[in-house]
Image (cartoon, rainbow, N blue to C red):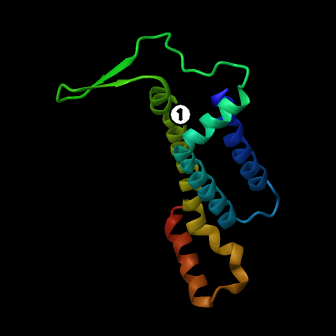
Amino acid sequence: AFMTIFWNTVLNQLGAVSNTLQKPGLDLNTGTQLLQGLQTSIKKHRENFECFEEKTKNLSTHVDFQYSKKRSDLKRKFPDGQSLHLEGSTKFKIETYYVSIDTLVSELDKRREAYSDISRLFGFFGDFRNIEEEELRECARKIVDTYKDD
């Protein structure tokens, strides 16, 4: 139930941004900002574990909510010989919840960076009428320098 609530929240955010990105006429700079905002929002979920856990408990009033102990509890060993014993909620948070968020943030960062790279070159077209002539020349020079072999 926890992951259902978590992914419902995340997928609603992803869906809203995806729908906006697909709208005709959306300029590149706005798309880049949308991806940055989405990434920031997803990062903030790292701090919301207890909130999702509480929602799960409230939703699961007739289901006994507990973390599975099917496998033996994990002991993490560090180079200095010390180990960390994880179980229950903490184990789930570190091994599943954080990993899900961090992976998603990393993948969003790749996409946002691709948009940013293109936006740095072509983003001025979205504000073409308000750019001074010298700035316009500089933007054109960047494109020519980037694609000098084309």
Snapshot quadrant of residue 12:
top right
Snapshot quadrant of residue 56:
top right
Residue 138 place in picture, x, y as percent: 54, 81
Residue farthest to the right?
Answer: 24
Residue farthest to the front?
Answer: 61
Which residue does the image show at 52% across and 44% down from the upper left?
A: 46
Please say whether residue 150 is visible from this viewpoint: no
Horizontal arrangement in the rendering, residue 94 relative to residue 38 (left or right) = left
Which residue does the image show at 75% across and 45% down from the upper left?
A: 15
Which residue in the structure is indicated by mark 1?
97
Please say whether residue 135 is visible from this viewpoint: yes
**Image vertical order of residue 9 relative to residue 76, above or below:** below
Residue 134 place in picture, x, y as percent: 57, 89
Residue farthest to the bottom?
Answer: 133
Which residue does the image show at 65% across and 66% down from the upper left?
A: 29
Closer to the camera, 32 or 84? 84
Horizontal arrangement in the rendering, residue 128 relative to residue 117 (left or right) = right
Q: Amino acid at mark 1?
A: Tyr
Residue 45 place in picture, x, y as percent: 57, 46
Which residue does the image show at 57% across and 68% down from the upper left?
A: 121
**Image vertical order of residue 32 relative to residue 134, above or below:** above
